[in-house]
Amino acid sequence: MLFSKAKFTPSVLRKWQAKQPKTAKLLQLWPVMNDEDKQTVGRLADVAKWPDAYLAQLAEPQTADALAELWPFLPEPAQEQMLHSLIALLLDETKQKQQAAADLLLRLADERMISPLIVAVLKDETYDIALASKVLAGFSEKSGRILAMVYSGVNTAEKKRILQLVGQLHPSTSTEILQYAVLEPEAELRILAAKTSALTPPPDLLNFLAPLVQDPENSVRAAACETLGRCGGTAAVPILQAAFNNDDAWTVKSMCASFLSKWEEQLAQQILLDEGESHGSGLVERVSGQ
């Protein structure tokens, strides 16, 4: 049979013009096609809307492989349409197809997907931030620049999603975006700014969070103290101690107390360890000197 011999002939193309091949058949013949054959098949695939049909079956075996092989030979408008379709599939009702779409976007690694994906995620809160961030991870710096540019012009819900993306992507523009966020009038954004600072800490975390430690909202102060406790190291201890002593909010006091007690336990353990090493060294020296 023709397919079993793995040869690409004009008769195969005529069959494909009449009926779209299954992905297994396409992949079987793809290695024996020359570039001219592939260009021809790419044009046929565009005219006959093969990508749409394959995308509908994306969760099935070999479908992503077939689309990845076709991709370089599709006309540019068809490529862009396919990117938009894959972005839409990140909202599919089945997790399997969502993951397959994300994996194929990663495989294609085309930066033309960055802006439409960011726009989609900001406008539709049902997008999985972690999944979108996974797709954008290879373009974190360009994504960060876009997020920084649009931050001031979007609404509160969209700003929340920007901060969530920043926490996942860790672009170099993180601090710039967080600087806007700590000054937001909405407490929920200031809380998220404090929590995001734990994921992508600014260069001077203690000074950066100082305004939030003095914030009028209890929940914001508690979030700032939590980040200091997790990421501030021993330099944050005096700040946490002062907040524990002076803050009237139980949530803030309890947050500070939890980290201060852990720090005291670690300090006590280190002292015991140091004393043990010191005594051990003295014993070795005494024995050696005998």
Image (cartoon, rainbow, N blue to C red):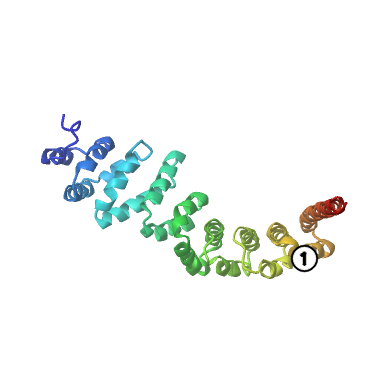
**Residue 156 pos. (x, y %):** 56, 62
Q: 99 or 118, which is in the foreground? A: 99
* Residue located 36% across and 52% down the image: 108
In the image, taking residue 271 as reference, residue 232 lies left or right, namely left
Q: Which residue is mark 1?
A: 239
Q: Is residue 8 above or below residue 152?
A: above
* Residue located 54% across and 60% down the image: 170
Q: What amino acid is found at the position of numbered circle 1 in the picture? A: Ile
Q: Is residue 207 above or below residue 140?
A: below
Q: 38 or 15, which is in the foreground? A: 38
Name the residue at the left extreme: 10
Report how many numbered discs are placed on residues in the image: 1
Question: Judging from the image, what secondary structure is the residue with disc 1 in?
Answer: helix
Q: 131 or 156, which is in the foreground? A: 131
Q: 264 or 23, which is in the foreground? A: 264
- Residue 94 appearing in the image: no
In the rendered view of the protein, which quadrant contains the N terminus? top left
Asked where in the image residue 53 lies, by quadrant, the reply is top left
